Amino acid sequence: MSDLFEIDNLQIQARKEDGTPIPIVKGVSFNVKAGEVVALIGESGSGKSTISMATMAYCRPGLEFPGGEVRLHGKDVLSMDPQDQRKLRGNNVAYLAQSAAATFNPAITIGEQVTEAAVLHGTMTQEEADKRAVELYHALELPDPDRLGRRYPHQVSGGQLQRLMAAMALVSGPDLLVLDEPTTALDVTTQIEVLKAFKKVIRDEGSAAIYVTHDLAVVAQVADHIVVLYSGEIQEQGPTEKIITNPTHPYTKRLMAAVKPTPVAGMGELVDDAFDRDEANVEVRNMTAGYGGIVNGKPVITVLRDINVKIKNSHVVGVIGESGCGKSTLARVIAGLLPAAKGEIYLDGTKLEADLKNRSKEELQKVQFVYQMADTALNPRQLIGDILGRPIEFYQGIKGSQRREEVANLLRMVELPVEFESRYPSELSGGQKQRVNMARALAAKPEIMLCDEVTSALDSIVSSNVIKLLQKLRDQTGVSFVFISHDLSTVGSFADEIVVLYAGRVVEQGPVDEVLAPPYHPYTRLLISSVPELRVGWLEDTMQKREMAVGIARGVEITERGCPFYNRCPIAIDDVCDVEIPPTIEPHKDHFITCHRSMEDIEAAEAAPQQILHGFEKAAPDNEKVA
Amino acid sequence: MTDMTQNEIQDDAQEKTIYDELPDAPPKKTLKLSWTGKLGVIVVAFWALMALIGPWVAPFDQAEILDMDSYLPPGAEIDGGGTHWLGSDNNERDTLSRILWGARMTVGISFVATLLAYLLGVTAGIAAAVKKGWTDMILSRINDAILSLPTIMLGLLIVVALGSSIPILIGTAAVIYASSVFRIARAYGQEIMVMDYVESAQARGETIWWIIFREVLPNAAMPLATDFGLRLVFVVLFISSLSFLGLGIQPPNADWGSMVRESLEAMQFAEGMGAWAPIWPALAIASFTIAINLIVDDISAKSGGDLAKKMIS
Amino acid sequence: STAQEALAATPKKGGRVKFASDLHGPSDTLDPGLNTSTIDYTRGRSFYNSLCQINDDLSTRPELAEEFSANSDNSEWTFKLRKDVKFHDGSPLTADDVIFSMSRHYGEKSTSTAKTLVADVKEWKKVDSHTVKAIMQGPNADLPVILGTPQFKIIKDGTTDFQTANGTGPFTLKEFSPGVRSIGVRNAHYWREGANVEEIEITAITDKVARTSALLSGDIDLMQALDPKAIRKVESTDGVGVWSVASGAYFGICAMTNTAPGNNPDFVKALQYIQRRKKIVKSVLKGQGTVGNDNPINIAYGADYCAGMVVKEHDLDKAKFHLKKSGITAAELNVAEVAPGLTDTCLLAQREAQKIGLDLQIKKVPNDGYWGAVWMKTPLNVVSWNMRPSANVMMNLAFAPDATWNDTLWKNERFGKLLVEVRGVTDASKRAEMYCEMQKMISEGTDEFPGSGMIIPAHRNYVDGKSDKVEGISRMPLGSLGGYEWPEFCWRTDA
Amino acid sequence: MQRMVFQRILIGFVTLWVVSVLVFLMTNALPGDVAQIVLGQSATPESLAAYRAERGLDQPLLFQYFSWLGNMLTGDLGVSKAGGATISSLISGRLGNTMFLAALVALISVPLSVALGLLAAMYPGTWIDRTLTFGTLALISVPDFFIATFSVLFLAVYLGWLPAIANVAPENTFWEMARGIAMPLIVLVIVVAAQMIRMTRAGILNVMNSPYIEMAILKGVRRKRIILRHAFFNTIGPIVNVIALNLAYLVSGVVIVETIFSYPGLAKLMIDGVQTRDLPLVQACAMIFCGTYVILIILADVAAILANPRLRNPK
Ligand SMILES: Nc1ncnc2c1ncn2[C@@H]1O[C@H](COP(=O)(O)OP(=O)(O)OP(=O)(O)O)[C@@H](O)[C@H]1O
Ligand SMILES: Nc1ncnc2c1ncn2[C@@H]1O[C@H](COP(=O)(O)OP(=O)(O)OP(=O)(O)O)[C@@H](O)[C@H]1O
Ligand SMILES: [Mg+2]
Ligand SMILES: [Mg+2]
């Protein structure tokens, strides 16, 4: 195969105020052959996004190209005239940006944005592009594919946006696809679908791809070739098989070592009992919440229903579930950002006001919320130093040089250089922003932290270090966590208890060891079996299992009647599961499963998943019922 | 691969050293001015200086009626000695001197009034956007009511009712223009209000002031700064139209707007360069406002133009 | 006189004349009794007639009255009406119309702006269908002149609606939009020769530069109130010219005599001596005026003017002397630009005051509401008067001890007595002597009886602009463009 | 969406009501006794009392307010105290003139200035932007009375191309009308365009740092489309607000232009009303201005809603 795309000694630098250059990418070279997928992996802030954008002769404002060449079909794109560079972008090279939520234009319909590049570059007519877009929506398991294009970005969830972004990159059939963390915001089940779609396009159209990620398991599934970056330099590169199984560079080795195994029972750590009281730190009772205001005591759009969760002192409660199931909503309700329609929240035994406006400053300090999307949660006009310094000053009254000292400590804690205090958020990488976002909550010295996907954009090393940091904090100060993540291994290793949410309801809840061990709720089981493994060919193997094919190919439907998982459940009972609210069974103490089936049925299903064919008919891949 | 990276990598990631030192002070993000911006600073500084020392450098007193004819052309010699470098006005006063004396009134009043208008309008406008509900309703309705009346009419009413003095003049201009600022600030405020970072500040328990001035305002600063530059002119002109109705600055004090207005007739009546009488003060206004706006543009270019420069036609 | 000359020059018929005054607005009216402004007066002259008409030399001639006469002591006046006069609606003019028109200037409910002028007429009597009689409270030789002033136009008996004008005048009303314009069409059934032009448009352009521009560009033919500074420009432009008529109109500073500082005669004297009268005439009025001597009466009033008085020259020493004597060091002068050049005049005074150690603060106040809120209310203010048809009328309006418009509230009983007495005096030298004494009282006062507190530095001409194509404009000094007489007599050279 | 528009209209009525209170109080607060000023120097105590009784000025203020409001609602604007003409007759012709001129100016200036603003935002920092910046600033910093007077002197007196006064009499031909209105039109376009140009530019540049703009660049979208399609639609809200404010000014604030060109419009009428203390007239004009303003603001709000899908289809 010929080299479609070559990066030759690429250098990118920023400049300090006084004009001295700060190198960001320090002479990187690698090639991409046609039909090949090259993965860029490396720690957060190592320059992955910067390099990916350089493929289109683009760099963020504030950065510049002092040297090197980027050749597509043998021609250097950096030295092309601007018109040709423009023609290249979106046509020959398509880009999938790291933060999908912010990258969609809120004022334009999804359809127009997805097809824009293809139509503008004249590769397709609007009708052709629309048709292809719809095909892609189908392939990416997006809901309501035929009409989705007419919606606006705010009308779909974050995970859906990321898939739409993928459709946008794929639509024009480019020579080179640049995918910057295309599945970070996705839960494992959806991730599989998206990976499948990428593979298909790359195979069918002979495109090449640069795939940026920090998730080595994913890399193992999609990449042919791996480039390992650290601090703007290539540490090692080679075929996937070789790098995965036999890394030579110490950094790669560490990266591999930090990868968490597939979650299994027993990997959670025991809680230090210094702070262990039985009394709940935060308790959510009978809570129902949703959006669109409250009418007749019910939210217009109900998202969460009858939630009961206890977060004990210095415990970590992991919340898992598919994209859009209401994980963030739960955290928002506890934080007081979204007053619940029904139910109460208790903090240390006293009732919290539903609306944060009525909470005291002390209560606000005790409960800290880390926003899922760091991009929008950091004020673009404030320096990092001020973003972090403010809670310190506000809650603790620490000012001046002492404040700076504290800020520096926080930055060190989340592994960011101290000098970042004088940067604006736009000058940070995705993972760096995420860490600043978390550091801001830490600055308040809370009693309970609501962490919404705090490690999703971090590489395995930094991520495990962050988790270590949180653990240390817990041990030292007794802070408790609500840890929302779709990364089951992280949850498995960090959490003490797990709450499994599905379509706004708790389907399973209990100590980590119980939840991650059979008997599972059918949905929990689906989740666990969808976690990619760090071995080449896992994806293909998984797809062989018919059960997976059945379970995955469905959207989430928030229903009022019956069991929400009914339409995806391999062991659902018709006319029961779809009409009656399932009862709660308690296989062990404090371990609850919500299901109509008996414990025996569930265990039987575990034993022979392949034999359960029930529900397959109604799960034919193209399902109209799913809207 | 350098040795240094080798070492780093082998270190435990938690004990990184290269960034560990705290710089002495956070480097200030200084504003880089383009040549137009620098020009703006020079001109504004000049007028600010004149506002302070104008009366002492002016060749004549602003009220001095020199025994000559009205609307003399620039360079005319005066009977009693001296030259009208920029000619004379309708009352045979020296235009240059009056412009220099007038800097104090014009630059001073318009700047203070616009600042006040901004303080008032931005605070209330963003507060309305932040607080929503009844606060917004009440503030917006009052504001709409003020805004729906013609400015001159309002000014007339206020000044006629309260009398004319410089503080009242400043207050009047501030109230009137605050209402326009309010609407614009509120429009931008509403867009910024929905951002997570504002919510996050609210969740921290921050006061409304912090949210207005630290969270929302900096994100609307650029269009508001642009508007500030324009509003300054409006205030200069507003004061001159009040002067025309006999409500503004009292004679013999000069303000540029009124100087233009009073000598407007020269364009018709006077001969030769004497007809330029209104142009000199008009140039003074223009130089001041353009200079201010050039600075504003540089400030806003910092927050707006970066990506724009990456566009390709 | 000029009017006759103009008439003699065989006017051409036809064409359209457009006139722009300086002020108009929603208060524009067709009710002669409410007239207060040039535009109203001009309109009145176009659509109505008076009993008597004033000549350029301020003598009178009959208009709707065929003839008029007084008894021996001028205490009873008889007016014989013309029989051939028809209103625009076709009805004939009778004595009833005159009685009705006059009655509107009497009584509590009367809104007439000129009621004080005819207050000494005890009764209007209808003698027969075409004869009326005015029975006076005392002798008054000025009655015909007074009746020649604009407010005393004759309207149809019983008229209450003034949205239209049913008069006897040379034009009939075609359009009347207050604050916009009025259009008159030549009255084909006029009782005498009548108007030369076919149509007149009466409008106003408030902005003086715009008004002058409209004249220069030929968009209007006649304009009222040309700024003296524009004279050079207008004169040097082809096709347009200046129409300047010397008059007794004046402006000045009023020092109220009932309060400080105006109650101090020395302070008033100091203000009078700092006036640079010649300079004001030369620079502010650009020569279109005459030096004033703090005397409301000037040469324009003819024989009644006291010519022998010495004009107070600019004299800072004297001013300083009087100021010192008065002990006053500061004062506040309220100024509204109610006449062109008034502010400039005050600024000049401010400058001179500074030289003698008087801190004269000038407070500019809006024209709006000036007459109601500032004039005659604040200690130092300004005033502007148009010329009145006689010295007696002028002084009666503004200086009589009980006059409502006595600018300075100056009360001099002897002056009041003389003012009434002189109306009955027929002997010319006696009359002149009496008028002279009165004018001295106003201007200088005596040791026991201080002067009026008026500072009148100049009398201004009526300066208007006209197109060279319009001829037939008289030089009557009682108002702009020859005392509003032009609608009937003007004509176009290009018609 | 319809509910939202309806809501705005309701709010509009609230605004009108607030203004009616304000207008009433303010006009009544004008110094000087109304009767005294109206009747002038010829006033006697009796005639003053008679005037007050006739006008209901001796009634309590609250009563006066409600009777005024009642009359206004039934379309009875009252009678001008001075000339005696009904206020509706004074206003009707001028209202037409004002609206005609304002509409023409809006028709020209809004597209023109938005286009120029977009152009400046498209090429920030380039000579196009600089020229536009200097041009608009130069124009805006020259007082409107200066521009108006200068254009009269230059176009009417010196060149003789256009009439010095705006002829809009009904008997005029179209050509005469067009010539008559040309100058006020030009001057007003200049006066209002500058702010709209500047604010459009600022509004656009304010969203230019958004990631979606970066994405558009990375999709190879052309400059023109980035500005027009991607940036503009996200900043329509504030821009229409600026436009609405300027259009409201065209209706109520153009006293100077009306004076200099002798254009019979409402703004001058209102000032005349204030000067002669013709309160019914002032109140009627103020209510008309407020009405237009409210309509413009409703339109601006609706436009902002239409342009912003987040407002159009709230979650
Ligand atoms: N402001 C809103 N108005 C209406 N519906 C909303 C709003 N925000 C979220 N939703 C809906 O509520 C549901 C739950 O959203 P939530 O953000 O809690 O999901 P999540 O579990 O955090 O998903 P993800 O993993 O993608 O972050 C989704 O279906 C979403 O579409
Ligand atoms: N405008 C800028 N000015 C200065 N430094 C910048 C700027 N933009 C990015 N950087 C720095 O460049 C480095 C590389 O950023 P990049 O976004 O490429 O990281 P990344 O590898 O994609 O990381 P992540 O996985 O966290 O997204 C980071 O250290 C970041 O702080
Ligand atoms: Mg990145
Ligand atoms: Mg979420």
Image (spheres, coloured by chain):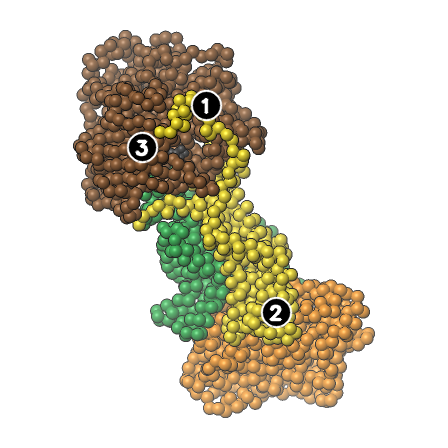
Chain colours: A brown, B yellow, C orange, D green
Residue where numbered disc 2 is placed: B93
- Pick the quarter of the image with the C terminus of chain A: top left
Q: Position of residue B126 (x, y in %)?
A: 49, 42
Q: Quadrant of the N terminus of chain A?
A: top left
Q: Which mark is residue A180?
A: 3
**In this rendering, which labeled residue sits more in front, label 1 or label 3?**
1
- Res C23 seen here: no
Dot 3 amino acid type: Asp
Splitting the image into 4 quarters, where does residue C338 fall?
bottom right
Secondary structure beneath dot 1 equals helix
Q: Residue furthest right?
A: C448
Among the 4 quarters of the image, the one containing residue C106: bottom right
Question: What residue sits right under mark 1 in the picture?
Answer: B15
SS for callout 2:
loop
Q: Residue at x 20, y 32 (%)?
A: A35
Contact, mark 1 vs mark 2 (Cβ under 8 Å): no
Distance from mark 3 CB to nearest ligand 3 atom below 8 Å: yes
Residue A176 in the figure: left or right of residue B281: left
Q: Residue D161: image x %, image y %?
A: 39, 73
> Which amino acid is tagged 2?
Arg
Q: Chain of mark 2?
A: B
| Label 3 in the same subunit as label 2 | no
Q: Earlier in the sequence, mark 1 or mark 2?
A: 1
Residue D148: percent from left, percent from top: 46, 66
Distance from Cα at disc 1 to Cα at disc 3: 29 Å
Decide: is D295 above or below C304: above
* Residue B213 higher or lower than A258, as above or below: below
Identity of the residue drawn at 56% across and 54% down: B45
